[in-house]
Amino acid sequence: MPKSQFIDPKDIRKSGKLTFGSIPVNQYKRNITDEKKNFSNDDFIRIYRDMVIIREFENMINDIKIKNEYRGIAYNHPGPAHLSMGQEASAVGMAYNLTVDDLIFGSHRSHGEILAKGLSAIHQLTENALMEVMKTYFGGRVLAVVEKDHKGTVRELAIRFLLYGTLAEIFARENGFNKGLGGSMHAFFTPFGVYPNNAIVGGSGDISVGAALYKKVNGKSGIVVCNIGDASMACGPVWEGISFATMDQYTQLWEEAYRGGLPIIFNCMNNQYGMGGQTCGETMGYGMVARLGAGVNAEMMHAERVDGYNPLAVIDAFKRKKAILLDKKGPVLLDTLTYRFSGHSPSDASSYRSKEEVEAWQNVDSIITYGRTLNEAGITPVASLDSIKQNIIEEITGILKLSIDDNLSPRLNLSTNPDAIAELMFSNGSVDSLDDRKPESLIPLEENPRVKSLKTKQRFYLDKEGKPVSKAKLFQLRDGIFEAVIDRFYKDPTLVAYGEENRDWGGAFAVYRGLTEAMPYHRLFNSPIAEGAIVGTAIGYGMAGGRVIAEIMYCDFIGRCGDELFNQLPKWQAMSGNLIKMPVVIRVSVGSKYGAQHSQDWSSLIAHVPGIKVVFPTTPYDAKGLMNSALQGTDPVVFFESQRIYDVGEQFHEEGVPEGYYEIPIGEPDIKRKGSDITILTIGSTLYMALKAADKLQNEYGISAEIIDARSLVPFNYDMVIESVKKTGRIVLASDACTRGSYLRDVASNIAEMGFDYLDAPPVVVGSRNWITPAYEMEEYFFPQVEWILDAIHERIIPLKNHTVTSDWSVETQMKRSRLGV
Ligand SMILES: Cc1ncc(C[n+]2csc(CCOP(=O)(O)OP(=O)(O)O)c2C)c(N)n1
Ligand SMILES: [Mg+2]
């Protein structure tokens, strides 16, 4: 809580009542004659055309899925296809007034939204702009296929491009909008403002909020629409995204120019089912999705239910809601009522609903109803509508032929280039700043009190006389991180940092002390206690074009942002065909002393997931250099920090920690002490334990240990380790992670394979016990100790003369523990 806001017990304890206003439900009353003021005949007809394009596109996919054939063209599509037949009016109505600067995010059922938004963009952009988009996208390779033999207008060409890029993506072809790596549930096309669609139900709920944050913080025009299903309204990311989007600080604390709500519409495509579960009456209790807005903020999120079976009602609602956002009064919750008469997927037998129900909705099918209305209002004869439909069928038939032609539309060739996907996993960029604006700050860098105080600190742990420097005078590991972070704040105007206690508290572990004085609210702020949203919004912020540092206060809390860390952060660069960049750094502090739920090193879990760079520095010099690299790059980095060593000084880099900027490449381990008889490879603060073990080995047993600090887990260059093993013939690996399934087990097995010829004994891993972390007073029985390292060497690698073991390294015990699962 900022000190500027006084929590007065007199006010807080007053009695009273909370009252809620009313939420409009299907209030749209205009008829087509009224709407003639707002739409030309061409507009009315275009709305119809767009709905039919979506319907026929999905008809085609449905036929392919069910009959392996569409209009005589045979094809087998084994992948997913969640169709939205019946929902076309809600998609077209949503997209109608959105510009290309307005971004939409969606779900597994978003083909219709992609096409609707794309068609709307094609209508709005100039022909030159359209040609530019098509020529530059993947170097024009998508365009090349549809351009051949095309005789129509540029806009018609662009429609072909849209249909082909989407269908080729669904069929996993390289010409697809995401090189075939997204597929049906994840296809998107950012030049038209179509951002990632998410196969994880509710996955867009927090990511989209991050994109809205990007718009707001960087003064970019446009709004964000988060299209999600009615069942996803139960999901954590959606609730956390809503909490993040409605924080009071936007309207109460942020500086004048930035004051106001986030520009986002949570648009629930309410088809009333989540697979076979009925959200109203069975799996949820909201009755109407719109009701949820009432509990969130005083504006009740401007919630409203709108009839998504009438495209004009949806257009009207989006127009009004967009105006609210542009007036900085967002966010908004829309409950767009709709119905899919297609199954959840083509194999769905619809056992959960009656034939009568489906027919009742088919009877009010928006395409038929709207077409009839146009005809009755004298806007267009039935024959014209029929011919629109016929043309669309022909067009889609042509697109299908192009998309399944293996010569025109091949897949990524993993036979000729087995690394084709590997090459798309990371972007490996190096960028000083993601925007040209001057970075905003409250004071010049030199005037910052912490920057000034750091100038007086000792940057090496020993003074000139070789005596240890006191903690008060020492430049510590936390200072190394701070210097990298503040430097980037003054270089990159897009950089924002947030998490729990990031502002007034100075970061839970004082890494950010001094930043609050330097940075305006919109660049540094406290988030809600919502780890999912902390990481999810960071992903959206990065995707939209900004750089972000989000913080998870304790490593144990990464379970709270599991989906964001495992399914979202690592995947979108590759799933976009490497068009999206992800300059997102997640700082994760590894705890100690606080028992089972605050003291786990889960770096192995993150390292297991392909697509994230993982670092774990343990010295001030490394922490600063690696943070600089992380903040210069364009890839997601999970940056582990150990609470045990935030206050250590630099012991290894003899010149001390440089004041200026330098980078340490991610992926390179570092020899912290040279030796010749045995290698000890460590991750995290176990380095300091290993140093003590090395002292003992030398002093008591005459064994010289070489100590290598991994520094990074992913990527990881084995050269130095293999070279060391060639010399020593022996290796122990130690970290605080529980031993079973740990990253060091993986490294050990790789070393056994790659360095077998040089090894005199198998690599041995010393990790924590496979238990809960006990209380601080019992930690010595859980985390690796100096003696454990010596015992492991003695028992498994090389007998140490007169050594008395204190921990049990017998094979029998190892097998027994494994049998018991502990
Ligand atoms: C986290 C997660 N849980 C379950 C699923 C399986 N699943 C896919 S779609 C779906 C129903 C989603 O319903 P809703 O959000 O209303 O979207 P709709 O399918 O109706 O468009 C489920 C349960 C999933 N993809 N992700
Ligand atoms: Mg649904």
Image (tube, rainbow, N blue to C red):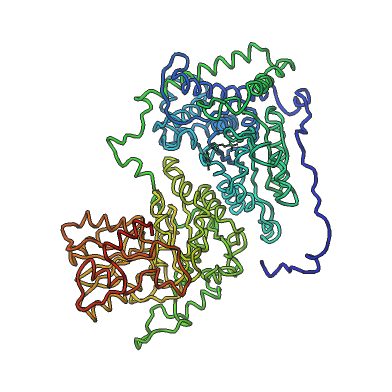
| Ligand 1 positioned in quadrant | top right
Q: Is residue 406 visible?
A: yes
Q: Is residue 705 above or below residue 67?
A: below
Q: Quarter-wise, where is residue 204 in the image?
A: top right
Residue at the bottom extreme, as displayed: 465
Q: Is residue 125 visible?
A: no
Return the x and y of residue 580 as percentages of the image width and height.
Answer: 46, 45
Q: Is residue 52 above or below residue 247?
A: above
Q: Quarter-wise, where is residue 784 in the image?
A: bottom left
Position of 554 with respect to 671 (left or right) is: right
Q: Is residue 187 above or below residue 668?
A: above
Q: Nearer the viewer, residue 770 or 404?
A: 770
Q: Nearer the viewer, residue 751 or 178?
A: 751
Return the x and y of residue 449 as percentages of the image width and height.
Answer: 55, 76
Q: Nearer the viewer, residue 518 or 74?
A: 74
Position of 473 with respect to 289 (left or right) is: left
- Quadrant of the rendering where the C terminus is positioned: bottom left
- Quadrant of the rendering where the N terminus is positioned: bottom right
Number of labels in the image equals: 0
Position of 603 with respect to 413 (left or right) is: right
Q: Residue at x 38, y 56 (%)?
A: 821
Residue at the top extreme, as displayed: 383
Return the x and y of residue 663 as percentages of the image width and height.
Answer: 38, 63
Return the x and y of residue 19 as percentages of the image width and height.
Answer: 81, 51
Q: Nearer the viewer, residue 110 or 275?
A: 275
Q: Residue at x 55, y 33 (%)?
A: 109
Q: Residue at x 27, y 65 (%)?
A: 810
Q: Residue at x 43, y 32 (%)?
A: 176
